[in-house]
Image (spheres, grey):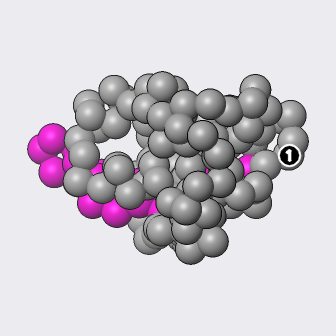
Amino acid sequence: MDIYRDEILDHARHPRNRGKISNPTHRSRTPNPLCGDMIDLMIRLEGKNSWVKEVGFEANACAVSVAAASMLTEKMKGKTKKELRRLREEDVVSWFGGSLTPSRRECALLPLKALQEALAVRQAHRPEPSRGKGGEEK
């Protein structure tokens, strides 16, 4: 199956959820060292079950990475943190028909790696600590 089928081309040309979100609770800027692509994934989780309230991404990346980020962020909406952790490489590869060259596979998996990194390290926006007259934290 050709990796540039209509759905993939549509996501590459018209990516869903592209752009910054306000107040992400989780974020990861993840590079692909093989080609220089970069995905900046932002997630805002809310509620008792930590479900995805909002998700966005910015990319300086190839069409395969952009399409994968678009498809991934669409699938993330409304999912819990636990459900996000269950996403696997095979899931992403299947969106491309299951047959990718090794380099294109790395491109397709970049957004998933960004998701895994974002979930591993919470990067919440917190206010700066209060400082006394001498600059020390209170």
In magenta stretch: residue 41: yes
Q: In the image, 94: left or right of 99?
A: left
Kindly identify the residue that appears in the image at 73 percent across and 37 percent down: 104
Kindly identify the residue that appears in the image at 84 percent across and 35 percent down: 33
Kindly identify the residue that appears in the image at 76 percent across and 60 percent down: 60
The percent coordinates of residue 111 (x first, y second) are: 58, 44
Disc 1 marks which residue?
Answer: 36
Which residue occupies the extreme left position in the image?
48
The quadrant in which residue 6 appears is bottom right
In magenta stretch: residue 24: no
The percent coordinates of residue 27 (x first, y second) are: 52, 49
One can see residue 126 in this view: no
Q: Which residues are magenta?
A: 38-56
**Of the pair 24 and 54, the residue shown nearer to us:** 54
The vertical placement of 23 against 123, above or below, is: below
Q: Amino acid at mark 1?
A: Gly
Magenta stretch, main secondary structure class: strand
**Of the pair 7 and 69, the residue shown nearer to us:** 7
Q: Quadrant of the N terminus?
A: top right
Kindly identify the residue that appears in the image at 33 percent across and 26 percent down: 86
Which residue occupies the extreme front position in the image?
1
Q: Residues within 10 Å of mark 1 (few under 14, many from 20)?
A: few
Numbered circles on residues, count:
1
Q: In the image, 42: left or right of 40?
A: left
The percent coordinates of residue 126 (x first, y second) are: 44, 56
Asked which secondary structure carries label 1, the reply is loop
One can see residue 59 in this view: yes
